[in-house]
Amino acid sequence: MSEAETLFAALRQSSGDDAVTMLERMVRDAPDHALTKINALDLAAKEGIGEEQVIAALLNAVGLGIFEMSWNVMCPSCAGVISANKSLKTLDRAQYHCAFCAAGYETTLDNLVEVTFTVSPRVRKIAAHNPDALPAAEYYRQIFWSSAIDLPADLEKLLREVTLESIDLPSGERAILSLRLPEGTLIVFDPVTHTAQFLDVRGEEASERQNLSMIFKNVQVPAETLAFRPGPLRLALENRTDSRVLPAIWIANQALDGLLKRRKPILNAKRLLTNQTFRDIYRTDTLAIGQRLKIMSLTFLFSDLKGSTALYDRVGDLVAFDLVNEHFRLLQKIIASERGAVVKTIGDAVMATFETPDRAIAAAIRMREAMSDLGAERAHQSLHLKMGIHEGSCLAVTLNDQQDYFGQTVNIASRVQGLAASRSIVVTEPVVENAQASALLENSGLKPTLRRVALSGIAAEMSVYEIP
């Protein structure tokens, strides 16, 4: 048995058979470019396998050394990878700048950071493991662009339509390109160093040759747009980096615009942090101490077991301990099935996160019924949950050596849970105003009741809704 076969046999012990079979087939038969920057959501859709099953299999495969995981800061405008990181710990900038788009973006985990997977050279060596040897078109496909862009099979042909001139320039070399500038906007861009120079070409035809010099360095320096006239240009290039560069003169035309608009869903960092398999594997080694990463929208659910103290008194410590553990097991199973994750437990309480409010409400409704069933099954009819849900921005942080969350959104979610009576679910206005959550409640025949409340530590009164 080969090492790869041994590793996949081990993977079958922790992951769904369909997903493992698919990954094993890919590693064996897929072309090189299909094994770098794997988009878990796109892969799941193409193979007809559940997203959560594919994500779990890839995460477990990373743990076994079959794949490597990358956290890529991507430009939301052009979908280019601005910074590739092996860990969230190295995302250390408040803002990232895309030279190709001449735009800066605040670092958030919602849509700016994608998570992709590349086969390990231990299992199979592919061209992307040596990017310096890739042809220019494949460098763009496999290295520069993120998994958010739906690149055509004939990418090289399309690139020719948007490229006026290009060159593969080795380290330490110089080159001179002679070309004619058409009217319009041009971009001299190198995907290796992320160096860009915008050219605004307009006016009468130049009678004499125009000149432009560019030096490529390891440090990116923003440059002002330069004005030129249509006509001849002498472009002098110098590579002062320790690797080759791939400068090209891009034409900002409809073909380029059409290429950049070809998008598909991605596995973003926010979703992965709310994945139970990810938390089980990387609970203590996600962020650096003191690191804070912003999430624009995350939904928090807090639950508490009503009357747990009386339960211990009524049935004894051993029975109550088993019952509370069974309650935790059921809740985690339901939360994970709704694409959420348990962040931590505090006594008999649970703190969980979800990507969207509708998933949290769906989980809460199921959790409530599961506790009623468990109470009836164990002849403890008073086994009920009190739950609160709130959605908003927060910070992903490390607290007590574990990945956690910080901010007013977390505080409000916790306070709202304290308003819940037996079996009730109390949610905030942002939750019920979410379109998917509203549709879920309507389809379930549940009509939330509005009330105004004052929460401890919150200056203004808030609108909350009780789901009966």
Image (cartoon, rainbow, N blue to C red):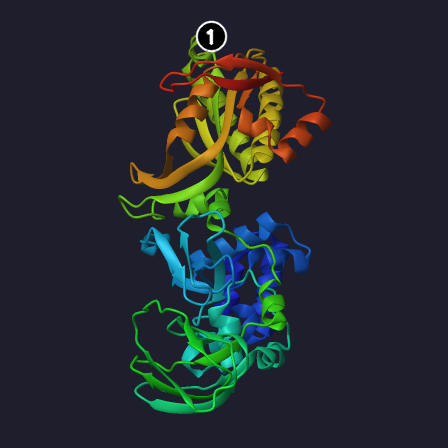
Q: Position of residue 202 (x, y in %)?
A: 51, 76
Mark 1: give few (<14), some (14-19) or many (20+) Cα within 10 Å.
few
* Above or below 391: residue 174: below
Q: What's the residue at 73%, 28% (across, down)?
A: 443
Question: Of the residues shown, which amino acid type is indicated by label 1?
Answer: Arg
Q: How many marks?
A: 1
Left or right? Give the position of 371 relative to 65: right
Q: Position of residue 170 (x, y in %)?
A: 36, 87
- Residue 120, picture quadrant: bottom left
* Above or below 24: residue 239: below
Q: Position of residue 107 (x, y in %)?
A: 39, 50
Along the line of sight, the residue nearer the viewer: 182 or 114: 182
* Above or below 106: residue 358: above
Along the line of sight, the residue nearer the viewer: 133 or 154: 154
Q: Secondary structure at mark 1?
A: helix
Q: Which residue is mark 1?
A: 314
Q: Residue 168: in sight, yes or no?
A: yes
Q: Residue 60: in sight, yes or no?
A: no
Along the line of sight, the residue nearer the viewer: 110 or 163: 163
Q: What's the residue at 41%, 66% (across, down)?
A: 99
Q: Quadrant of the C terminus?
A: top right
* Above or below 267: residue 122: below
Q: What's the residue at 37%, 38% (across, down)?
A: 404
Q: Position of residue 451 (x, y in %)?
A: 55, 13
- Residue 30, picture quadrant: bottom right
Left or right? Give the position of 412 relative to 369: left
Q: What's the residue at 59%, 27% (across, down)?
A: 432
